[in-house]
Image (cartoon, helix red, strand yellow):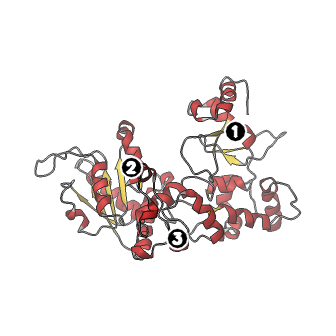
Amino acid sequence: MKSGKIILVDDDRRTLEGLVEKLERATGLKVDSVEAPNLDNLDEIISTKPDLIIVDYLLTMKRSDDTIVNYLGGTLLTRLREETPDIPLVVVSRPPIYGQYPQLRKLSEVADLVFLKNHLENEKYRIGSKLKALIEGYHDITNYDLEKRNWDLLLKLLGATKKEGELLDETNPPIGPDNSIRLDETELLSGNDCNNETFRGWTAHDASRWITGILFSYPGILYNHQYAATNLGVAPESFLSDTTFQDKFKQEQYAGIFKGYEELWWRGRLRSKAASYISHRGTTPIHTIFASQFNEAFDAKLTPSYCNSSEENKEYADTICYILQEPVKTQYSLIYYPDNRPGIMDPARVSFKAIETTNKAKRRLFKKSDQKLFDAIRSGLVGK
């Protein structure tokens, strides 16, 4: 990204300069800071035509004119979203505040991203990449007039095929293949009827909520490197480091709108390409033979993904533990329900190991039929 401007609304002058510098380093973009505005006068922010607005959640300091800010960042974000559906909005906060205010974690209705200040320079969280991806994605969308934003354009921006579109339609996108408006839960409860509304297209935020909040967040249609690797029976580290593999599977990587927000691969394309490199497969699962056959064919060095370290009884992992974020064999895990992901997505699974060795798995989020097994695993009566 060659240019762009970020507006930061933060009233903590003690740390403001440092946060601006970190944001500029992370994004390579100009960051201007402003005081929290009066809610009835947002023009001082919007009129500067920012490419992205970041709001600190806890706005409690006095303004320079000694007036007190009488609202939280979420209130400002809601007002900004009403005025700016085609500008990305982001919330920033500190860990103690994130834990103290549960409503902060429920701002996806208006915010495109919530991040913690101490995560900004940690490469694991990719905050700089996500901010730039949001700006670029919003720009890509706003190149099209609202009335032209139909289902076909959505698929085009995603780089999805018609077959993939059929799967995407089952994930509650902002508009359907018939260009009908999709209502969220709040609108449904209010009694709105999409059939009585004229076609209006979808906003950039409509698309962002769906793409980053659903498609990128839940494995199923798109896979991050852990799920992609394990689905092929490859160790995640090997998946990323083997240059021969990465070159052969370059076209299967997601390159659509908001690319750069996460590194992702199309699941169907990945498996189809992998199958093309396997000879005499029969009914043998891909993940048990792909690595060895690919290595033999291309002199590659892919490491198989095993769910245990026993040399005598190595078993291939085929999914990822939701809690430990490590490969596990489905047989040694239980389905878990930590969220409301669409049914077409892969279910979350928690390994027996995670149940036995951590306290992070909540009993009530397992099927009732699995809760006795959960108790047995937690008691050390079942192992793996």
- Nearer mark to the viewer, of 2 and 1: 2
224 on left or right of 129: right
Pointer 2 residue: 107
Which of disc 1 and disc 2 is earlier in sequence?
2
Looking at numbered disc 2 in the image, what kind of residue is underneath it? Leu
- Residue visible at 25% across and 59% down in the picture: 33
Question: How far from the left and from the top, in percent, is residue 303?
Answer: 74, 54
Pointer 3 residue: 151
Pointer 1 residue: 333
Residues under numbered marks 2 and 1 in contact, where contact means CB atoms less than 8 Å apart = no
SS class, disc 2: helix
Q: Residues under labels 3 and 1: Cα distance?
A: 38 Å
- Residue visible at 45% across and 68% down in the picture: 137
- Toward the left, the furthest residue is 65
Q: Residues under labels 3 and 2: Cα distance?
A: 26 Å
**172 or 37: nearer the viewer:** 172
The reply to whether residue 308 is in sight is no
Crowding near pointer 2: few (<14 within 10 Å), some, many (20+)?
Answer: some
